Image (cartoon, rainbow, N blue to C red):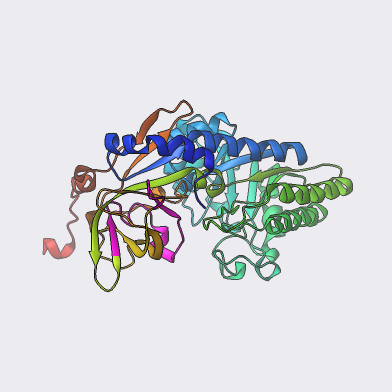
Amino acid sequence: MPMSTAFSARLLPILPDIADHFGTPFHIYDEVGIVEGTQALRTACEREIGRFKAYFAVKALPNPRILEILRVQDFGFDCSSVPELVLARQVGAYGEELFFTSNNTTTAEFEAAVGEGGAILNLDDISLLDRLPVVPETICFRYNPGSRRTGNMIIGNPAEAKFGLTHAQIVPAYRRARAMGVRRFGLHTMIVSNERDWRSFAQTTAMLLDLAAELSEALGIRFEFVNIGGGMGIPYHPEEAPLDLTQMIAAMREHFVSFEARWGYRPALYVENGRYVTGPHGVLVTRVITRKETYQTYIGVDASMSALMRPGMYGAYHHIDVLDGAGRPTEIVDVVGSLCENNDKFAVQRELPRADLEDVLIIHDTGAHGHAMGFNYNGRLRPQELLLRRDGRVERIRRAETADDYFATLQCDPQPLHTRQDVS
């Protein structure tokens, strides 16, 4: 969706100076928008649900300056790799402030997760209990409901997903964890991605609480929390409605109240959002470097798919504005980068105000899964990241990659292996 009115008012008057000073392309993030959004989520959930913890999905925007902002807002961090754990610990998150969701995880990764103050372990399979270097106090399992639920268009059919334990596996998994010495338990699932229908999250809450009741009845265990995962969506298209947070939380509250009435306690609600927290509060700023007229009109910019993969990868829509383009005649164009791939396009046959050389384009909603999904095909280098501070200052929080960065891993110890054939 287009930038919020407040973000536009803060950014657009100074954007020409920012582009001249830092050069293009760059992603720029809005501190005020991130803080206000996180406060609204946390306040509403704590008021209606009670015990609540939000974990930011580090994969969405793995920049320590952003993590510092979220840490001040009492967010924890959802991690799925050792580098993500390192980033989160660098900003002071330890122990239950970290949620480590395993996915085809090695013993070495589990050792990193339980070291340096530990983390909540969210296991993807019962067999992973054998890989744990120590028996933790708390264990969570990721549940895959299979045919009991349908995912959305992005996640697809849960029964075809590689994630999580089946319904038949879930009781044996908790039974075995308890027998190993685990004393505190959580329950996790993730059914949808970029979902804006609040009813989906209410259904997921009900499903997890029903499963917690089933497990409690079968094993006599009490659940510290249920984690409905991420997947809360944002409206990328201008005409789309946002997720109705008020309706969602009210419906979820009813399920928690019913559970408490039956079992005498209320588990905490955990969520692990990325896109919902930072997605609308970032834009990719790029400059027009070519106009090409062939069978159609191409607007070439100095960013490419390596700076924002989503449109080229699966046709995702990102709104685009031409800075100071209001009042210009419009035209139908493709907005393209410089990769040797025909899908290196930010927009296909999009109606935009006419854009000429040196004009600045603003590509919206890149605050999540933008820079983080970057790559180096064709030797293209990932752009810098900037932060628009509360007081109007703009800081560079990640420099652009250089050719030296690209070639750095070629400087290595060859460690030759002498085989029997070499000796003979």
Q: Left or right? Give the position of 16 relative to 77.
A: left
Quarter of the view holding residue 22 = top left
Q: Is residue 86 visible?
A: no
| Residue 70 visible within the image | yes
**Which residue sits at x=56%, y=61%?**
163
| 299 to 16, vertically: above or below | below
Q: Quadrant of residue 395?
A: top left
Is residue 306 found inside the magenta-colored segment of the image? yes
Which residue occupies the extreme top position in the image?
A: 391
- Give the magenta range: 298-327
Q: Residue furthest bottom?
A: 295
Residue 391, above or below 196:
above
* Quadrant of image for the C terminus: bottom left
**Which residue does the image show at 45% across and 56% down from the upper left?**
318
Query: Is 89 placed left or right of 285 in the picture?
Result: right
Q: Residue at x 58, y 35 (%)?
A: 36
Marker count (numbered): 0
Tell me residue 3's x, y (percent): 49, 46
Residue farthest right in this picture: 261
**Picture coordinates of residue 191, whole percent (x, y):** 62, 60
Q: Nearer the viewer, residue 47 or 3?
A: 3
Magenta segment, prevailing SS (helix, strand or loop): loop
Q: Whole-percent x and y of residue 20?
A: 27, 37
For the residue pair 328 and 29, the one nearer the viewer reads as 328
- Residue 217 is covered by the magenta coloring: no
Residue 137 coordinates in the image, percent (x, y): 65, 39
